């Protein structure tokens, strides 16, 4: 009953015309920056921060949150249409989404991404309302050993991502880990492999890598083709998901929502890990794992739901503990400070109207996003009809602007270009890009958490197994490795036996 | 005939330019917008500080102040950029100390020296606090020091970064208290908070806004690095009143490139000092969690000189400069 009262109080705040307006502005901006490659929610929120001086705190938080989850909605669009993730959490969507678009099924892919996001967003809000306090405790239970083990599991997941050669995937993953060592060694304070370039001190930026590997390389690939054609040569089939699509997607959406929400609560690049984990899980549970990577709708539905649920989950440590789960939330925290609001464990009791108002507005915002995005689908699909010669130079320009807008750094433009060439070569030799990205993100965090854990335990490596949460992750990782090896071993043994049998004769 | 005109036009142009240049140097300053480099991300403390003061800057000097974000390498990129900028008063930057002192001493890629700037003003500081986790067997600074003396190297203390301001604070505290703690370098206050609240580290040196936020979660704030007690932290003593003469904190101010023309530097000094001593500005800064600490150009220059000597001595004693990392 108390919750109903709170929600009612929140609704009163959220339905005020001015708050409705700022919610709409927020989700609209979010969709836009999500769709434009490279222009991420962090940049958009930072750009709008000065505006927030002049509007009330509730409206500020509502608008900035809207940008955040709106960007998660929009991010999938370019992944699906032109194989270019709008932001990091949509990398995985490229795998099946782009294949679907090539088969003329961009409509259903966009549709399921929007519906999946809506369902996940809705479930995520219920999650916040019902589970905020226990989930906050869950987030605090993660120390360096737990993070290390979780990231180890992330690396192991790469095996399951693989749709081609596992060996090649491992090669790219290890290359990604190596790239991750560039920059300041955060434990010793030493600079590694920076060659005197200060811009590299913080490591290789994630966005330039993603944009280069996926975006620029896609453009390079297409330059080779005949310029008069359009991206999708086949006829665009239906625009909305069919009944079969729904059957394939509904379970991945629900599972992705749960998984995304759980992982989203943890500080770190949660939405990214959530999408990879969801994809791997769906592939593992699926009766037809071979369809993943070929344009299977479940490969879009799961991760797209997961990243939206993760963005809801990330609100929990912000509101209950004052801990920013990622860089976007950190800018939101800055907005609190500008308004003299004290984040922390007392936030919800001190400013109930802001907390509940924001929660209800998130629900409204999710509904707005669905209404906003569904009519856009036919329009987006038409983008595919634009000739290469016009579309790709435009994308290239957006990529350049997007990357530059992140840190206003020319070095990052150079990095993006270099990754573009790397991506082109990798495509030519049939290497997957996703393992490299995941390793590049996880590598530095995995390393620093390993070393922090050992510093804390005075060098005793058994902490990874004696800490229960960490032990569970290590256990899952081991199971994943073993379960993947058994079929291979069996095959070999049977071959070996056959051979023995032949020898007997 | 034509060439004559051309010469005339060229001459006129050159003359015109030199007049504008002369005006920009002298009394006409500032004649165009001023670019203000911010060394950290939008929404961070340095950005918030600038945003609060921006309208006052613009009113006092009559031109726009345009923020230019250059976040990389803990601020070093921004300051290196400023060190190479033209000393014409149209490029300024916010700076943090001791960052601007430790970076040239400990980072091999850093090309600037602490002396490469004109220290125009100090604005405010963010005091550091010493907090311990819930259930730690010490609830006062004295108990903490006693416990650490009995268990040398056993107590883990987290703070942001290596060779950073907070790291120096920890080193200084260990030296003054005569104790040995295991230092855990984390990345960002956002990481320090959950680690201390979750009890993964025993203690942490963290900025006072974070300490205020964590009140009520079971962590205990043992001491704060201000001269007088902070009203946001009721009942928390200062290090100094407990007999440890240290003031761990991060200072922030405004710098320009070295060799700023004297009249320009004076004009900025006067304008900035009026702003940082303005009651309304100070109230806004306090509300955002900062401690106003206004200084004139002369005071700021002297202060930074003293700070550098202290930091250098500390790094020397801890043998942290032997190999420039």
Image (cartoon, coloured by chain):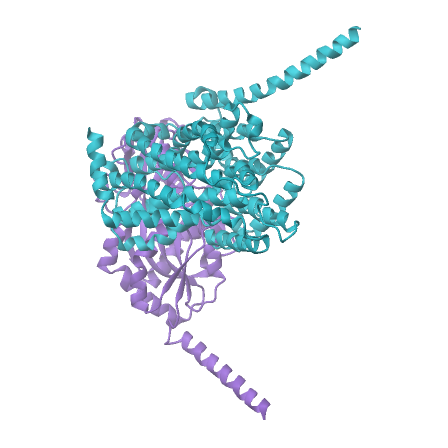
Nearer the observer, B55 or B167: B55
Which of the chains is cyan?
Answer: A
Quarter of the image for the N terminus of chain A: give it.
top left
Residue B220 pos. (x, y %): 28, 33
Residue B276 lies in quadrant: bottom left
Q: Is residue B59 above or below residue A451?
A: below
Q: Is residue B77 visible?
A: yes
Left or right of A144: which side holds A399?
Answer: right
Residue A459 pos. (x, y %): 49, 26
Residue drawn at x 63%, y 47% as measured from the top left: A221
Residue A483 lies in quadrant: top right
Left or right of A9: which side holds A199?
Answer: right
Left or right of A49: which side holds B184?
Answer: right
Residue drawn at x 20%, y 38% as measured from the top left: A9
* Number of numbered discs: 0
Residue A91 pos. (x, y %): 51, 40
Which of the chains is purple?
Answer: B
Q: Residue furthest bottom?
A: B1
Quarter of the image for the C terminus of chain A: give it.
top right
């Amino acid at each position: 009953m108390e919750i109903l009262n709170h929600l009612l109080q929140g609704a009163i705040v959220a339905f005020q015309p001015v708050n409705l307006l700022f919610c709409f502005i927020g989700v609209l901006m979010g969709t836009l920056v999500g769709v434009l490659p490279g222009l991420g929610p962090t940049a958009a929120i930072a750009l709008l921060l000065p505006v927030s001086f002049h509007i009330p705190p509730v409206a500020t938080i509502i608008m900035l949150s809207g940008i955040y989850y709106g960007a998660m909605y929009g991010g999938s669009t370019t992944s699906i249409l032109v194989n270019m993730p709008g932001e990091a959490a949509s990398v995985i969507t490229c795998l099946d989404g782009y294949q679907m678009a090539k088969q003329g099924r961009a409509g259903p892919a966009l549709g399921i991404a929007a519906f999946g996001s809506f369902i996940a967003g809705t479930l995520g809000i219920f999650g916040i309302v019902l589970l905020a306090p226990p989930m906050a405790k869950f987030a605090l239970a993660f120390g360096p050993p737990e993070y290390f083990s979780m990231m180890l599991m992330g690396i192991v997941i790469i095996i399951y991502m693989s749709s081609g050669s596992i060996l090649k995937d491992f090669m790219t993953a290890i290359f990604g880990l190596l790239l991750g060592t560039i920059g300041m060694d955060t434990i010793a304070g030493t600079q590694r492999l920076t060659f005197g370039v200060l811009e590299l001190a913080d490591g290789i930026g994630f966005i330039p890598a993603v944009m280069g590997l996926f975006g620029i390389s896609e453009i390079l690939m297409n330059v080779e083709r005949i310029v008069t054609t359009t991206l999708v040569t086949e006829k665009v089939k239906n625009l909305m998901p069919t009944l079969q699509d729904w059957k394939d997607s509904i379970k991945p959406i629900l599972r992705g929502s749960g998984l995304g929400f759980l992982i989203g609560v943890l500080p770190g690049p949660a939405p990214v890990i959530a999408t990879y984990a969801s994809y791997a899980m769906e592939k593992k549970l699926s009766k037809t794992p071979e369809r993943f990577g070929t344009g299977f709708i479940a490969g879009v539905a799961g991760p797209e739901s997961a990243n939206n649920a993760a963005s809801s989950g990330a609100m929990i440590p912000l509101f209950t503990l004052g801990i920013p789960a990622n860089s976007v939330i950190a800018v939101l925290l800055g907005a609190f400070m500008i308004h003299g609001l004290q984040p922390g464990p007392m936030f919800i009791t001190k400013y109930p109207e802001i907390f509940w108002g924001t929660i209800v507005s998130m629900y409204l915002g999710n509904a707005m996003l669905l209404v906003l995005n569904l009519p856009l689908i036919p329009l987006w699909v038409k983008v595919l009809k634009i000739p290469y010669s016009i579309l790709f130079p435009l994308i290239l320009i957006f990529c350049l602007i997007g990357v530059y807008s992140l840190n206003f750094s020319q070095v990052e433009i150079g990095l993006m270009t270099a990754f573009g060439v790397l991506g082109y070569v990798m495509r030519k030799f049939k290497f997957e890009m996703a393992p490299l990205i995941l390793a590049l993100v996880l590598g530095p965090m995995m390393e620093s958490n390993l070393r922090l854990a050992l510093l804390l335990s005075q060098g005793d490596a058994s902490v990874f197994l004696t800490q229960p949460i960490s032990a569970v992750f290590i256990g899952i990782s081991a199971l994943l490795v073993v379960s993947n090896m058994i079929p291979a071993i069996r095959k070999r043994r049977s071959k070996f036996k056959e051979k023995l049998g032949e020898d007997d004769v | 005939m034509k060439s004559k005109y051309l010469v005339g036009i060229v001459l006129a142009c050159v003359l015109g330019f030199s007049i504008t240049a002369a005006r920009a140097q002298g009394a006409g300053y500032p004649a165009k917008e001023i670019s203000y480099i911010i060394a950290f991300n939008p929404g961070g403390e340095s950005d918030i500080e600038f945003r609060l003061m921006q309208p006052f800057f613009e009113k006092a000097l009559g031109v726009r102040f345009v923020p230019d974000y250059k976040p990389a390498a803990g601020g070093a990129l921004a300051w290196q950029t400023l060190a190479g900028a033209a000393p014409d008063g149209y490029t300024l930057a916010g700076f943090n100390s001791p960052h601007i002192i430790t970076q040239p001493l400990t980072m091999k890629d850093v090309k600037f020296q602490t002396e490469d700037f004109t220290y125009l003003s100090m604005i405010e500081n963010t005091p550091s606090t010493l907090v311990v986790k819930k259930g730690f067997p010490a609830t006062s600074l004295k108990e903490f020091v006693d416990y650490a003396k009995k268990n040398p190297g056993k107590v883990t203390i987290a703070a942001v970064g290596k060779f950073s301001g907070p790291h120096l604070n920890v080193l200084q505290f260990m030296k003054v208290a005569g104790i040995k703690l295991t230092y855990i370098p984390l990345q960002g206050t956002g990481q320090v908070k959950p680690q201390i609240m979750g009890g993964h580290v025993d203690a942490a040196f963290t900025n006072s806004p974070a300490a205020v936020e964590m009140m009520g979660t079971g962590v205990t704030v043992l001491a704060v690095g201000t001269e007088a007690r902070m009203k946001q932290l009721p009942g928390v003593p200062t290090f100094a009143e407990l007999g440890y003469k240290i003031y761990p904190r991060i200072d922030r101010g405004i710098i320009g490139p070295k060799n700023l023309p004297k009249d320009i530097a004076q004009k900025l000094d006067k304008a900035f000092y009026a702003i940082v001593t303005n009651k309304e500005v100070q109230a806004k800064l306090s509300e955002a969690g900062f401690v106003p600490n206004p200084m004139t150009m002369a005071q700021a220059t002297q202060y930074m000189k003293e700070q550098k000597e202290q930091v250098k001595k500390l790094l020397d004693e801890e043998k942290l400069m032997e190999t420039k990392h």
